[in-house]
Amino acid sequence: MKYSEMLIPTLKEVPSEAEVVSHQLMLRAGIIRKVAAGVYTFLPLGSRILKKIEAIIREEMNRSGAQELLMPALQPAELWQESGRWGEYGPEMIRLKDRNGRDFCLGPTHEELITEIVRNEIRSYKQLPITLYQIQPKFRDEIRPRFGVMRAREFIMKDAYSFDLDEEGLKVSYQKMFDAYSRILKRCGLEFRAVEASSGLIGGKKSQEFMVIAESGEDIIFYCPKCNYAANIELAQGENKVILEENILPMKKIATPGKSSVEEVANFLNVSPGKLVKTLIYQTEKGLLGVLIPGDRAANETKIALSLDLKELHLLKEEDFTKYNLIPGFVGPIGLNDIKLVADKNVKKMRNFVVGANEKDAHFINTNIDIDFKVESFDDFTFVKLGDLCTNCKVELKEMRGIEVGHVFQLGKKYSEAMKAYFSDQKGELKPFVMGCYGIGVTRLMAAIIEQSHDQYGIIWPFSVAPFQIVILPLLTDSLEQKKRSEKFYHELERLGLEILYDDREVTPGVKFADADLIGIPLQIIIGKKLNQGRVEIKLRKTNEKFEISADDVVKKCREIVQKELEKLGDKSG
RNA sequence: CGGGGCGUGGCUCAGUUUGGUUAGAGCGCAGCGUUCGGGACGCUGAGGUCGGCCGUUCAAAUCGGCUCGCCCCGACCA
């Protein structure tokens, strides 16, 4: 492609709307332009990059045996009502009516549609297992779109769905997808980590996220430096480092006038916040719930809801406290007869702790479970924090940030049962499909690659996803010799199947260098004055390595470099 | 939804506090010339209903009300 004929509107200055580096560079490099908050146009360069990423995903999906199909973005409400998610999804789903007043939505995901297809078209165990996928736009009306395409309202996603006859089969299908995802991210040149995650609204038991490691990531991951345990903070588990052995003391009520927060009470009693136990009162669809957690930890509502199988879980509003004879700031487990009480596992080990006395300006000290009160059950109800130990190997957990680019779920029968999607097994009995679903945010992946691969001059595309692998830069615009030679390289390299951007613009060398660096083409062929001695320079964008070579060797050398670099990324197709 | 900020040529911004000529700068864009290994220089030029509506005033980018859009923090969320 000739640069002069391509729309690549690069910007010198950083548009004020962009906060993170990938967003800034995507705007500056002429990859995207904003249409509305969280809605973007992909310009020609962006479109080429998307196609490169999609091609890698297709190759790996197909290699793993998945089949591509294409489902619509516009979906009728009926299917969502069948699964129950029309009500569950909330304002994040973009809903609309057709001219006849029928309800539709723009699909935020496609479990319902795929289940509809499969229940109609697949009847026999002989047709299983099957995995279907598509690459297609999704719509989610995010509360706060941000970071450019990283959290957008319209975005491109690869979503795959597996159908098996039993749980065993699901595990096999899931593993195939897991492996495919690992290959995809490796080929995109990414440093990533698979972590245990919560399955949220999608549902199912086991789920793992593929996290691209980046400071700007929105997710926090805890991992063990010794074993390979890694989990999203939303469900990461750890254990308390210190366990204090103390003799049990008799409980005693003491006055704590005006001291209601953990910090105030701890200061007043001259103890650490870890000596206190907070009693949080939640409103749930099963009634009120009291959750006891150590004073120095934060409640993790994802874990609580998961452990106790709750759909609704909201902290009791302060104005409702009086309804149940509760006193804000002085709630405690003793005397809460009508409220189900559970406790974080860390509380189990605590001795002689402090709790609210359920009366104004008073706390109990030296409280102990089973002596002073009882709880129904213990489980992990809090967030891990730095300093906690890995439950497997008792080593301190470490923390890092990541960008969630992929998520794989073992769904089970949630959708097949709700939507009556059955097949006949060997015995002729009807059984629900056992499903898995697997997503990759294609547009988010693009941003994640930039987050991990850029420098002060611009983007550094890995060879596998670069919009062009090579850029040819003749420096002297009125040199016929340089122009002829550039065109020769351009045609010869293209004939080899390489992707070439030929900068034929009549601009100064500085502009060409700056744009080539900014848009991140990984290999540059620089044709300058030394061409009259038959010498040409080639430069690797990533390392800034420069080689001056004979013009006759350029084509061969470039082909070698591209092939070698693609192989490094585990991409044999180049 | 709560809090904060912003909206002036394609981009970055000044001007708004204290209303008053033809609304400015840099970058970008067009033409000509000189340049040509890291965003060159000179000259000439095009381009703006100051987000929108209503109001106050002799007079509004500037003051008031409403409204729309965008960004950041939070709550929330695959």
Image (spheres, coloured by chain):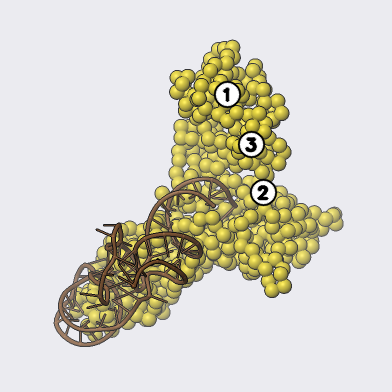
Mark 2 on the same chain as mark 1: yes
Does dot 2 land on a helix, a strand or a loop? loop
Q: Which residue is rendered at x = 48% and y = 52% of the image? A: A403
User: Is residue A167 left or right of A395 when viewed as pictured?
Assistant: right
The quarter of the rendered structure image containing the C terminus of chain A is bottom left
Question: Which of the two labelled residues, at mark 3 and mark 1, occupies the earlier sequence position?
Answer: 3
According to the image, label 3 marks what residue?
A320
Q: Chain of mark 3?
A: A
Q: Is residue A86 left or right of residue A432?
A: left
Q: CA distance from mark 2 to mark 1?
A: 44 Å
Other residues around mark 3 within 10 Å, as few (<14) / some (14–19) / many (≥20): few
Residue at 56% from the left image edge and 20% from the top image edge: A362
In depth, the one of A346 and B10 nearer the eye is B10
Provide the residue designation for mark 1. A360
Instruction: State left or right for residue A451 relative to residue A238.
Output: left
- Mark 1 belongs to which amino acid? Lys
Residue that numbered label 2 is attached to: A204
Q: Are marks 2 and 3 on the same chain?
A: yes
Vertical placement of A355 versus A483: above or below? above
Task: Indicate the colour of chain B.
Answer: brown
Above or below B40: residue A368: above
Whole-angstrom CA distance, mark 2 to mark 3, is 34 Å
Q: Nearer the viewer, residue A328 or A338?
A: A328
**Which quadrant holds residue A70?**
bottom right
Residue shown at the point (67%, 22%) measured from the top left:
A335
Residue A497 sits above or below residue B16 on the image:
below
Give coordinates of residue A368: x percent, y percent: 60, 18
Mark in the foreground, 2 or 1? 1
Q: Nearer the viewer, mark 2 or mark 3?
A: 3
Q: Measured from the top left, where is residue A141 in percent x and y?
A: 57, 59
